Image (tube, helix red, strand yellow):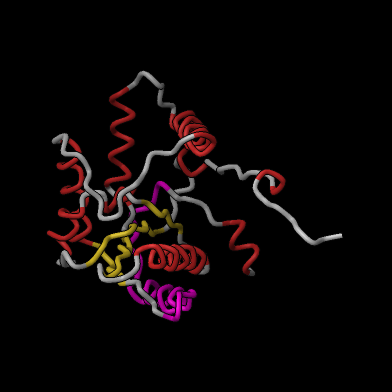
């Protein structure tokens, strides 16, 4: 698989087989992925890899916080989408719920699916990406975004699927409780990783992309 093929094949995997992923494979992925570019070669990323009981504790802690009605308090606040960006978000949700056979009015099923995100979609392992709070968060966000994409591409070489998600770190106090990541670090995203369950309907979703004509300006070409 070449780079172009990997970029085209990468997708958000939202259901995994229970089969564990060997630590040596995860190390190989990170050895490649940390070649991702960063501003001034600052390499701001700090990576925590979780599996086993620690990951199970995170699943349970996140689920309990969500069910208690506790509002998320992420280290990296998010603004709600507006306009065309909100439209794309809604279209994605509709397509996913149709595949999952979840009706709009079925609040119980919608909540159950929401919980899956906070439970890392059942993945056998996850990467938690963080950076030191002293850094310029705008540049760190860009750099860690590049790392996240590179992790997802490198994982494909080992037959693994991934899903970049903020849900795994929306309750940072839960993550810190079970991982020991200190308050001085800012939690950005989690990446679920494992062997995809291709029979699960959620993995039948292939999100659309806008035409280049809608988001690209070409200047100076004849």
| Outermost residue, front side | 220
User: As rendered, which of 125 and 12 lies closer to the eye?
Assistant: 12
Is residue 189 shown left or right of residue 222?
A: left
Answer yes or no: is residue 53 visible. no
Q: Residue at x 45, y 50 (%)?
A: 13
Q: Quadrant of the N terminus?
A: bottom right
Is residue 209 shown left or right of residue 145?
A: right
Is residue 172 shown left or right of residue 120?
A: left
Q: Quadrant of the C terminus?
A: bottom right
Q: Quadrant of residue 79?
A: top left
Q: Residue at x 35, y 64 (%)?
A: 137
Q: Quadrant of residue 39?
A: bottom left
Q: Is residue 190 above or below residue 167?
A: below
Residue 116, given in percent of the width and then of the height, sits at 31, 42
Q: Residue at x 43, y 68 (%)?
A: 143
Residue 155, given in percent of the width and then of the height, sits at 47, 66
Residue 25, given in percent of the width and then of the height, sits at 40, 73
Residue 105, given in percent of the width and then of the height, sits at 36, 18
User: As rendered, which of 50 and 19 lies closer to the eye?
Assistant: 50
Answer yes or no: is residue 45 visible. yes
Query: Residue 191 in magenta?
Result: no
| Outermost residue, top side | 105
Query: Residue 23 in magenta?
Result: yes
Q: Residue at x 44, y 53 (%)?
A: 196
Q: Is residue 21 above or below residue 61?
A: below
Count every numbered label the image shows and give the total: 0
Range drawn in magenta: 14-41
């Amino acid at each position: 698989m070449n780079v172009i093929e990997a970029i085209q094949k990468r997708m958000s995997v939202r259901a995994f087989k229970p089969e564990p992923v060997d630590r040596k494979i995860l190390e190989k992925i990170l050895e490649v992925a940390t070649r991702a570019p960063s501003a001034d070669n600052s390499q701001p990323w700090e990576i925590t890899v979780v599996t086993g009981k620690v990951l199970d504790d995170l699943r349970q802690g996140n689920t309990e916080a969500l069910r208690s009605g506790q509002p998320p308090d992420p280290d990296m606040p998010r603004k709600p989408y507006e306009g065309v960006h909100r439209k794309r978000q809604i279209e994605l949700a509709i397509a996913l719920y149709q595949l999952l056979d979840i009706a709009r009015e079925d609040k119980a099923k919608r909540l159950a699916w929401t919980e899956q995100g906070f439970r890392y979609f059942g993945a056998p392992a996850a990467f938690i990406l963080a950076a030191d709070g002293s850094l310029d968060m705008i540049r760190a966000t860009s750099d860690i975004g590049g790392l996240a994409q590179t992790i997802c591409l490198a994982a494909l070489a080992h037959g693994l699927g991934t899903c970049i998600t903020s849900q795994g770190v929306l309750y940072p106090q839960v993550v810190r409780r079970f991982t020991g990541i200190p308050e001085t670090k800012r939690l950005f995203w989690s990446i679920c990783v494992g062997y995809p369950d291709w029979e699960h309907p959620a993995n039948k979703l292939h999100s659309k992309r806008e035409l280049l004509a809608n988001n690209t300006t070409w200047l100076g070409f004849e």
